[in-house]
Every structure is written in structure tokens, then in C-alpha cells.
Image (cartoon, rainbow, N blue to C red):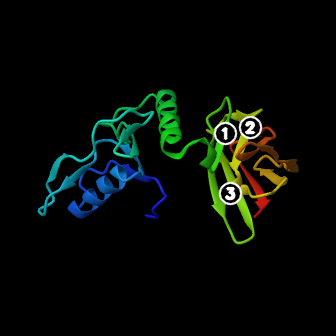
């Protein structure tokens, strides 16, 4: 993992002892960790040991000179999690470990909207996925300048036949745009 990157431990209940030491050293030395569930090291036989990280809040807790944000397990005992509460906790945790200015993508929408970025040699594609039978209207997409660069226009194509060019507006450390209304799936593409 590159030195400046945030380490994500997703239900890491059996880390190798060397990985566990490295994660803790990295955190105490100024790194950032986002942990889902209790992280623990395993012994040589593979048996999980005690918890590796100190307790922390979703909004971030200082450990040494680093920051640890802790969230519940991704697969909690087969229970269905409260998605709205989980999304708010995740947002606080991401703010704590990434900061607002380094976010690759963000969205403000009344409908839950998944944004997946894909970078090719000549373009950045933002795949936008909404729940089935949900119409997305008035959603604002934010793309970090480290991803979008200096682009000022993008092409928006949706599965319902919309194919338009839309403007991207500078907004702090990101570019923003209000997306046209669409159902299900759409792609926003911009030159890299």
C-alpha cells in the first residue's frame, strides 16, 4: 500500500502477524485506517487473537499521529442493516480518513445512487447506478479535480435513451454538475 494511502480493513479478523504489526506501525506513524468490524491478528495456526486496533469512533479517533475510523462489520450476523444510518456513519468515517478535498466522487441525491469511476488512457467514466424502479432527478455529482482534471464538459448517456453534453462547474476541490433525470443506469464520460 502506498505510504499516503488510507488502509481499509474490511472484516480483517485473521491478519498475518507481520501485516498486523505493519498496520499498527503505520497508524501510529501518521497513517489513516478505515476499519469495518474488529481487526485481529491470527497466530501461526490461524486462530484469531485479540483485537488489533484500539476502539474508535466512526468520525475518527487519533492514534499516535494517525487517524482510525471504525465502523460495524460489513456482514453483521445476517441482519439487514439500517442503510441510511450505515451511509451516514460511512460518510463521517470517510471524512475523517480522507478529508473532504481528496474525495474522488460524491453525490447528493434523494435516491440512493452508486458511483463507480473507471479511468482509461483517454477518458474518465462515472458509472451511475440507481435502485431498480427508482427515477433519479435533480442529483448533483461531484468529481475530485485529481480525477476530472480541467474538464469543463461531459457526455451523459443513460439506458432510457438520453445522450447529452452537460457542463461541469468548479466547486472547491471538485467539479460538480446536476445530472439529467434517468432510470436505473447511466454513464458520464469526460476526457482525461
Q: Is residue 134 left or right of residue 170?
A: left
Q: Position of residue 120 (x, y in %)?
A: 68, 68
CA separation in Å, label 1 and label 2: 6 Å
The residue lying toward the viewer, choosing from 138 and 39, is: 39
SS state under label 3: helix
Q: Nearer the viewer, residue 10 or 66?
A: 66
* Disc 1 and disc 3 in contact, CB within 8 angstroms: no
**Distance between the alpha carbons at the discs numbered 1 and 3:** 15 Å
For the point 80% across and 45% down, the residue is 170
Asked whether disc 1 touches disc 2, contact meaning CB atoms under 8 Å apart, the reply is yes
Task: Work out whether 143 lies above or below 124.
Answer: above
Q: Nearer the viewer, residue 102 or 190?
A: 102
Q: Earlier in the sequence, mark 1 or mark 3?
A: 1
Q: Which residue is mark 3?
A: 147
Which residue is labeled 2 in the image? 140
Examine the image and state in which quarter residue 70 appears. Answer: top left
Q: Position of residue 153 (x, y in %)?
A: 85, 53
Amino acid at each position: 500500500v502506498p505510504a499516503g494511502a488510507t488502509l481499509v480493513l474490511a472484516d480483517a479478523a485473521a491478519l498475518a502477524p507481520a501485516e498486523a504489526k505493519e498496520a499498527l506501525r503505520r497508524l501510529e506513524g501518521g497513517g489513516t485506517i478505515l476499519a469495518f468490524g474488529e481487526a485481529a491478528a491470527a497466530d501461526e495456526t490461524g486462530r484469531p487473537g485479540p483485537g488489533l486496533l484500539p476502539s474508535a469512533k466512526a468520525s475518527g479517533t487519533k492514534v499516535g499521529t494517525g487517524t482510525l475510523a471504525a465502523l460495524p462489520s460489513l456482514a453483521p450476523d445476517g441482519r439487514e442493516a439500517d442503510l441510511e444510518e450505515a451511509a451516514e456513519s460511512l460518510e463521517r468515517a470517510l471524512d475523517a480518513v480522507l478529508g473532504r478535498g481528496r474525495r474522488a466522487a460524491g453525490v447528493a441525491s434523494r435516491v440512493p445512487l452508486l458511483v463507480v469511476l473507471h479511468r482509461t488512457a483517454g477518458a474518465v467514466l462515472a458509472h451511475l447506478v440507481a435502485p431498480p424502479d427508482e427515477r433519479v432527478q435533480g442529483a448533483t455529482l461531484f468529481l475530485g479535480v485529481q480525477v476530472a482534471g480541467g474538464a469543463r464538459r461531459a457526455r451523459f448517456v443513460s439506458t432510457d435513451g438520453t445522450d447529452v453534453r452537460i457542463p461541469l462547474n468548479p466547486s472547491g476541490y471538485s467539479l460538480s454538475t446536476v445530472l439529467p433525470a434517468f432510470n436505473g443506469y447511466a454513464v458520464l464520460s469526460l476526457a482525461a
